[in-house]
Amino acid sequence: MGFRLQAADPGAIVSIVILAIIIAIRISGFAILQYGRWKYWYIDGRFNGSKAVSVILTIHDSNDPNLVDYVRSILKNKPECLLITTNNRKAQHRVDGKLKGLRFAFSDTKIRVGTVNEPNRRREIAHALDSVDTPFVVLTDQGVHWGEGFLKSVIIPFANHRVGCVTVPMMARKRDGIWGSFWTCLFSCYYCLVTERNRALNAFDSSVVFTGSPIMFRTKLVAQPRFKQQFEVDPCLNRRHGVHKADEYLFFNRYFLQEEGPHEEPCLVVFQDMPEVMVSVDRPSIAGFLSEYLQMTRNLWRLSRVMIRRKERSDDYGFGGTLIMAVLVGCPAYYFLGILKLVELATAWKADVELISEEEVKVRKGDLEAVRYHEARADIEEPPWISECMELERPQGELRPLPDFPLYVIAE
């Protein structure tokens, strides 16, 4: 009693056709992903140019107990300057008070803490970019831990003059406890799936989908008038719901792949997947992870990217048997996240936006013909940066020898 197509009703035939299409798409996506993984190779070698790098760190929670650890992991890489941005004056002084010990320990790096008049992530980043005087900039967020060899490895692709931006993979930071380890493993599996997709995309056309920080780019690319005219007035969808206040990585993803001029090619974006540049991120709650996932899904819908089937990476992260549990839970979680994608598609018009007038848009773009241009610019001047001199902070008093190194007086 085999299956006879003539005896099947129209509903069964339609179901078979739909399933065949879905399976064909899945198999094609899996084949493309495997070919991209085989074709991809990270860039190795040496960078002989200027290695002066400025780092922009955005802080949204100045009371974070791990704040000093984030900053210390950055300073161990010895950047030229660290610009920390906050969303108000109170947070600015609170963060600055936590950095006094780090100012002494890493005196070779200029540490500056700034803020803006109104909470707006894009305004914070633009305010920090105005103070950058190094060839390269790294944009990173709170909750991201760097390895000590991060900057040395992430700058290597810039030996190619066409490379304009480099992004790196991430892994969830391990937490204590059974449940903490389990959720960390589950989050890390998802990040590995995203990494595999980015490897394939980068191998095919030198593009990548930014999942978050950190990213490193050439300063000259964001010093162009085109960037300043678009970054803070990036319209939300059909231009009727204001401009974006956040989702800055969505903008960078589009901006670096655009043509710089009528006869110029777009810059290359490199996904540098090597152990030295792997960063670990804190994901303290499921709600925080889902919020990040929905934000990335929303950005993918806006970018009109084709979702390639994801596959787990076989990377030993020291979880042991927890990995099996995470995979079992990950199967229904994968389809649950798929439902959330549809929800985001239906609510893609919702975003963190700022409603501003047409005159304000002209002012932010730098249009000198805008009404009251100079008065408007004077109203949005941001507070000054905090960067105290090291010599003024050094405690006064006589120097005493360390107990491990006694002084010996040689009599004449």
Image (cartoon, rainbow, N blue to C red):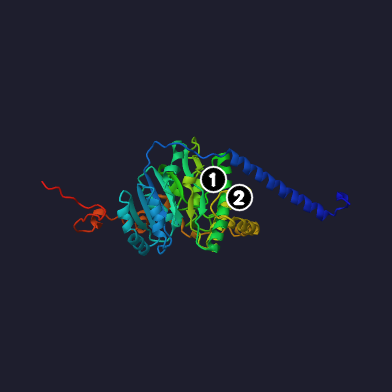
Label 1 vs 2, first from the N-terminus = 1
Residue 5 or 235: which is nearer the viewer?
Answer: 5
Direction left: furthest residue: 412
Residue 284 or 81: which is nearer the viewer?
Answer: 284
Q: Which mark is residue 322?
A: none
Q: In the image, what residue type sits under mark 2?
A: Glu
Indicate the position of residue 101 as horizontal and vertical percent values: 32, 58
Tell me whether circle 1 and circle 2 mark residues in contact (CB < 8 Å).
no
Count residues near mark 1 (Cα–Cα under 10 Å), then give few for <14, some for 14-19, many for 20+.
many
Closest to the camera, between mark 1 and mark 2, is 2
Looking at the image, residue 129 sits to the left or right of residue 306; the answer is: left
User: Where is 336 relative to 130, above or below?
Assistant: below
Q: Secondary structure at mark 1?
A: loop
Looking at the image, residue 392 sits to the left or right of residue 6; the answer is: left
Q: Give how far apart the Cα atoms at labels 1 and 2 are.
A: 18 Å
Count residues near mark 2 (Cα–Cα under 10 Å), then give few for <14, some for 14-19, many for 20+.
some
Task: Report which residue position mark 1 lands on.
Answer: 208
Instruction: Inspect this view and state whether residue 369 appears.
Output: no
Count of labels in the image? 2
Task: Report which residue position mark 2 lands on.
Answer: 312
Indicate the position of residue 211 as horizontal and vertical percent values: 52, 51
Residue 195 or 112: which is nearer the viewer?
Answer: 195
Indicate the position of residue 168 as horizontal and vertical percent values: 49, 47
Residue 333 or 232: which is nearer the viewer?
Answer: 333
Looking at the image, residue 308 sits to the left or right of residue 115; the answer is: right
Instruction: Inspect this view and state whether residue 20 appears.
Output: yes
Q: Secondary structure at mark 2?
A: loop
Indicate the position of residue 121 as horizontal and vertical percent values: 44, 57
Q: In the image, what residue type sits under mark 1?
A: Val
Direction front: furthest residue: 411
